Image (spheres, rainbow, N blue to C red):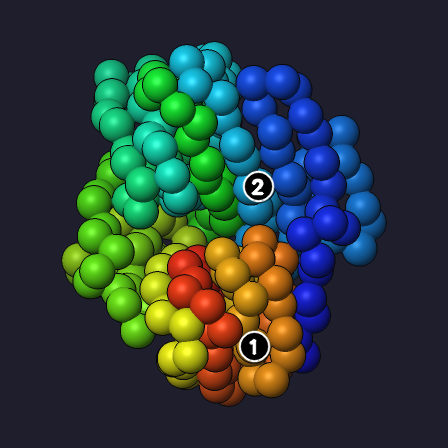
């Protein structure tokens, strides 16, 4: 099954400093048919104005992945962590027993990012945060692992049976991802692509299940973010 969720159909909240699109029910946006996809609970497509951001607020028992598309985000939390994550790079936060954090765009330009929440497999775990750079040229034509539940794979670690991957495709090229039919995959492209022959446009959500292999063909240069979860 490949279900396209057009960008125009996503939940929308415009707070002035924050223009957010919600792939799944979040805050004041509620759609009973879009409560999540497997263990993926939130996928927000955020545009954050320059010199603004999310003030300190709490989370617990959730794996929160931030993929920065353009600009940069600066993180600080109650554990004493602070760091800047730039375009193409990723940060993860395991909220565990509870953490306060803030995310600010301290840049002189708008920052765009995906904020992805995945249900944790370790409720009550010690909270943690980490970030890593992932140069886009290292993922041209193939998926690069950005975060997973395996602490030995060289990527960022989350407490969930999930893999977060990124790729770039030149227009007119394709790549193939070997999947498991009982998994829940969710893909968001930056440009028009075809997934096993089904067309998706820029920033559409693509919910995939029951597929053992997916082939993605790009009409124009495209950046892909994929989560493979239980």
Q: Position of residue 100 (x, y in %)?
A: 42, 18
Task: Please give the label number shown on residue 194.
Answer: 1
The residue where tag 2 is placed is 44
Total residue callouts: 2
Q: CA distance from mark 2 to mark 1?
A: 22 Å
Front position in the image: 205 or 160: 205
Question: From the viewer's perspective, is 54 left or right of 130?
Answer: right
Q: Quadrant of the N terminus?
A: bottom right
State which mark lies toward you, 2 or 1.
1
* Residue drawn at 71 percent across, 36 percent down: 12
**Outermost residue, right side:** 32
Question: From the viewer's perspective, is 1 left or right of 130?
Answer: right
Front position in the image: 205 or 37: 205
Query: Element type at marker 2?
Result: strand
Asked whether residue 38 is in view, the answer is: no
Residue 163 drawn above or below residue 62 = below
Asked whether residue 224 is in view, the answer is: yes
Front position in the image: 55 or 108: 108
Q: Position of residue 194 (x, y in %)?
A: 56, 77
* Residue drawn at 76 percent across, 36 percent down: 29
Front position in the image: 55 or 47: 47
Query: Element type at marker 1?
Result: strand
User: Where, by quadrant of the figure, is residue 204 drawn?
Assistant: bottom right
* Residue drawn at 48 percent across, 79 percent down: 217
């Amino acid at each position: 099954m490949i279900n396209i969720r057009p960008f125009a159909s996503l939940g929308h909240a415009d707070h002035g400093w924050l223009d957010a699109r919600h792939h799944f029910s979040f805050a004041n946006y509620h759609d009973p048919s879009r409560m999540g996809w497997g263990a993926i609970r939130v996928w927000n497509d955020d545009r954050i104005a320059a010199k603004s951001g999310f003030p300190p607020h709490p989370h617990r028992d959730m794996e929160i992945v931030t993929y920065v598309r353009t600009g940069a985000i600066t993180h600080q939390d109650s554990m004493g962590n602070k760091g800047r994550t730039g375009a193409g790079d990723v940060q993860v936060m395991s909220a565990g027993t509870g953490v306060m954090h803030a995310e600010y765009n301290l840049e002189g330009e708008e920052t765009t990012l995906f904020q992805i929440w995945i249900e944790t497999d370790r409720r009550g775990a010690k909270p943690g945060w980490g970030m890593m750079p992932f140069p886009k040229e290292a993922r041209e034509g193939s998926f690069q692992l950005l975060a997973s539940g395996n602490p030995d794979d060289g990527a960022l670690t989350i407490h969930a049976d999930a893999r977060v991957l990124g790729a770039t495709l030149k227009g007119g090229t394709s790549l193939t991802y070997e999947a498991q039919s009982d998994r829940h995959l969710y893909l968001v492209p930056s440009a028009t692509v075809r997934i096993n022959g089904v067309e998706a446009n820029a920033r559409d959500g693509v919910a995939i299940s029951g597929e053992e292999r997916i082939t993605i063909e790009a009409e124009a240069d495209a950046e892909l973010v994929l989560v493979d979860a239980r």
